[in-house]
Image (tube, helix red, strand yellow):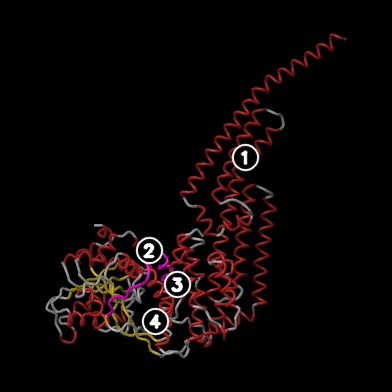
């Protein structure tokens, strides 16, 4: 088998000693010694409570953590004699661990998990991130059950969010993936999610694991593969999404998500070029939950960054965008901040022109993705100005209208995509 | 007297005939060399063009921004430019060989010198091209990084990087063809030194306030006021 060449011998021995399983929970780690115990507790409790008769394994794939995360995982497995809270599964919950590299790599970690799912013939797998500090046992069951019981091939998470959180997902990733791939899955870029053994086998056969885009965000690539292959996809509500404690490098986020999405569009074009409209997917729990807490971020700085970006990157934007689109952006960049409005129609047009320019490689692709950042800031500023005091319903309505605009303009994308730049 | 004149004339005539007899085959050989050279140059041009098409050099050149400069200078695509350069370099080489076959006194030394210079000119063109590509790529990367990080004067940074790489490439190319080596070296040292001195003075005197703000922002409690990007995911 192809995967035999990259799995370590010790890891293979551990997998063989486990035999076949029904469920696999993958926990990729790197320096997570402080939160791992709580994560494992939630996973085990969920398995004990909800899958008493199923054969299950918890797999830790570690990137050589200096804080001895892997050793902690092994030790916590050795001292465990009964399930948490006194519950005991009728079957042994196996724990296996491997060190897949000396540096963290999302792609390599998931590749190991997917190979293990395939080798152990697991029917359902959930990937759980130990960085999620508010993980509860219900998260694990909500990801595993739709795959195991409802025969879904992919289960994406749904989170409760504050209104100023996840804005890139709301304004770009969700509406664009929905319009392009035709399925209304809100979160394809996620840290917790579930998939079937069937999807694992299909993805394992593909040659894309070494690609940079897949290495950065393999979960989105697998989700798009599932949508493209017509497999059954769904989403399941988990709970509130906690913001990471440190500041975000927006350029790196764009590289990993938007860059990855454009790459997936390129490699899956046969699946989406002739597809129109979008379909709802099976959803377990509420479709969305938006809280009104959170202070709106400062719009002044965001607007300045947008305005300077449009002015400084003028030749770069001119080579990517259509002439009239570029002219519209320059016009709104000159407007007064208090009256600033970035129309949804213009935003969609910009994104489609960027995607087509990425396809035609009008300039270095990494540079192209970076050139989108100032325009995103403009759209963000407009959103914050218009929704500073809006209700959750109004914000959701805005999001839905944007999604519809993406679907309406899809023929324009196809035209630019297939035409010569 | 008359006989001497006739003898002189016949001697001159026979010399002329002998010279023509010696020159004509050389001229024919030269023409053959030039025609063969033309064919070889065409074949090499076609091979290079095919290889560059396979390696997608035009796409690379487009990505790096070099194609834009070529268009601005009304030059053809990168593949076409390189294959045409190879054609002319090869054919010029054959023409020079042909001329040397003629055996014209005084030309031999000049031709040998020019002949030795041809590969150096080709390498110099390659250095200039790579310099252009690298300068465009790095200056654009710097511009994007500076704009997205919200730095002031990102264009100045971008143009500085472009200028330094251009200067370096131009001096390397001139050094390669051996044009006034000492002058080029001196000129490069002066330009580079002046640039660094200028930057040092600019940052030292003009940027005192900026440096103070930077240090205050990064080392004092004001760091907390740093712009935080709204949570994208």
The chain identifier of the residue carrying mark 4 reads A
Foreground of the two, B23 or B71: B71
**What separation in Å lies between label 2 and label 4 (alpha carbons)?**
39 Å
Dividing the image into 4 quarters, which one contains the N terminus of chain A? bottom left
User: Is A266 a magenta residue?
Assistant: yes
Q: Tag 2: Cα neighbours inside 10 Å, few (<14), some, or many (≥20)?
A: few
Q: Earlier in the sequence, mark 2 or mark 4?
A: 4
Residue shown at 66%/64% (left/top)? Answer: B193
Say the numbered circle drawn on residue B116: 1
Q: Which residue is mark 3?
A: A254
User: Is B225 a magenta residue?
Assistant: no
Range drawn in magenta: A255-283
Q: Which residue is mark 2?
A: A274
Say the numbered circle drawn on residue A244: 4
**What separation in Å lies between label 4 and label 1 (alpha carbons)?**
64 Å
- Helix, strand or loop for disc 2: loop
Q: Earlier in the sequence, mark 3 or mark 2?
A: 3
**What separation in Å lies between label 3 and label 4 (alpha carbons)?**
17 Å
Is disc 3 in the same subunit as disc 2?
yes
Q: Residue A171, image x and y in percent?
A: 44, 77
**What separation in Å lies between label 3 and label 2 (alpha carbons)?**
27 Å
In the rendered structure, are the residues bearing label 1 and label 2 in contact, judged by CB atoms less than 8 Å apart? no
Foreground of the two, B164 or B156: B156
Q: Tag 4: Cα neighbours inside 10 Å, few (<14), some, or many (≥20)?
A: few
In the rendered structure, are the residues bearing label 3 and label 1 in contact, judged by CB atoms less than 8 Å apart? no
**What separation in Å lies between label 3 and label 1 (alpha carbons)?**
52 Å
Q: Residue A332, image x and y in percent?
A: 57, 78
Front of the two marks 3 and 4: 3
Residue B118 relative to residue A238: left or right: right
Q: How many marks?
A: 4
The chain identifier of the residue carrying mark 3 reads A
């Amino acid at each position: 088998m192809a995967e035999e060449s990259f799995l370590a011998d010790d890891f293979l021995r551990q997998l063989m000693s486990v035999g076949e399983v029904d469920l696999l929970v993958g926990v990729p780690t790197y320096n997570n010694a402080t939160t791992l115990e709580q994560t494992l507790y939630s996973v085990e409790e969920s398995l004990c409570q909800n899958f008493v008769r199923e054969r299950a394994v918890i797999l830790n794939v570690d990137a050589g953590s200096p804080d001895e995360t892997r050793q902690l995982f092994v030790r916590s497995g050795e001292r465990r004699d009964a399930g948490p809270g006194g519950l005991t599964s009728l079957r042994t919950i196996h724990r296996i661990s491997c060190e897949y590299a000396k540096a963290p790599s999302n792609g390599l970690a998931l590749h190991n998990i997917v190979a293990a799912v395939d080798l152990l013939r697991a029917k359902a797998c959930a990937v759980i991130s130990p960085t999620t500090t508010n993980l509860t046992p219900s998260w694990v069951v909500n990801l595993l059950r739709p795959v195991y019981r409802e025969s879904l091939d992919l289960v994406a998470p749904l989170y409760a969010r504050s209104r100023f959180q996840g804005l890139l997902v709301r304004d770009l990733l969700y509406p664009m993936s929905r319009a392009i791939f035709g399925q209304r899955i809100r979160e394809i870029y996620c840290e917790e999610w579930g998939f079937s053994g069937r999807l694992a086998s299909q993805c394992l056969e593909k040659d894309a694991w070494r690609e940079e885009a897949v290495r950065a965000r393999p979960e989105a690539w697998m989700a798009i593969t599932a949508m493209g292959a017509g497999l059954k996809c769904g989403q399941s509500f988990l709970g509130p999404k906690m913001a990471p404690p440190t500041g975000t490098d927006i350029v790196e986020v764009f590289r990993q998500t938007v860059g990855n999405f454009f790459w997936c569009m390129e490699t899956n074009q046969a699946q989406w070029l002739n597809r129109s409209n979008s379909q709802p997917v099976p959803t377990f729990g509420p479709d969305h939950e938006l809280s009104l807490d959170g202070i709106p971020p400062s719009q002044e700085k965001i607007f300045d960054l947008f305005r300077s970006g449009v002015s400084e990157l003028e030749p770069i934007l001119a080579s990517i965008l259509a002439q009239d689109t570029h002219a519209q952006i320059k016009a709104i960049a000159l407007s007064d901040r208090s009256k600033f409005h970035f129309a949804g129609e213009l935003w969609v047009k910009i994104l489609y022109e960027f995607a087509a320019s990425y396809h035609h490689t009008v300039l270095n692709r990494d540079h192209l993705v970076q050139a989108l950042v100032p325009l995103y800031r403009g759209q963000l500023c407009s959103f914050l100005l218009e929704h500073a005091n809006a209700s959750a319903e109004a914000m959701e309505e805005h999001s839905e209208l944007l999604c519809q605009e993406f679907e309406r303009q899809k023929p324009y994308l196809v035209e630019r995509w297939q035409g010569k730049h | 007297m008359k006989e001497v004149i006739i003898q002189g004339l016949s001697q001159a005539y026979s010399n002329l005939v002998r010279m023509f007899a010696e020159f004509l085959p050389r001229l024919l050989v030269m023409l053959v060399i030039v025609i063969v050279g033309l064919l070889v140059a065409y074949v090499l041009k076609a091979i290079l063009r095919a290889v560059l098409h396979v390696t997608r050099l035009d796409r690379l050149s487009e990505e790096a921004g070099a194609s834009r400069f070529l268009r601005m200078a009304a030059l053809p695509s990168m593949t076409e430019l390189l294959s045409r350069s190879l054609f002319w370099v090869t054919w010029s080489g054959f023409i020079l060989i042909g001329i040397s076959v003629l055996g014209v006194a005084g030309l031999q030394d000049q031709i040998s010198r020019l002949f030795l210079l041809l590969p150096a000119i080709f390498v110099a063109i390659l250095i200039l091209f790579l310099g252009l590509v690298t300068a465009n790529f790095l200056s654009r990367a710097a511009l994007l990084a500076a704009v997205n990080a919200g730095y002031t004067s990102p264009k100045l940074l971008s143009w500085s990087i472009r200028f330094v790489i251009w200067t370096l490439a131009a001096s390397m190319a001139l050094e390669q063809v051996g044009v006034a080596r000492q002058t080029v070296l001196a000129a490069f040292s002066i330009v580079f030194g002046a640039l660094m001195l200028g930057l040092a003075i600019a940052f030292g005197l003009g940027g005192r306030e900026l440096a103070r703000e930077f240090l205050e922002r990064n080392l004092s409690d004001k760091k907390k006021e740093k712009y935080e990007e709204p949570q994208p995911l």
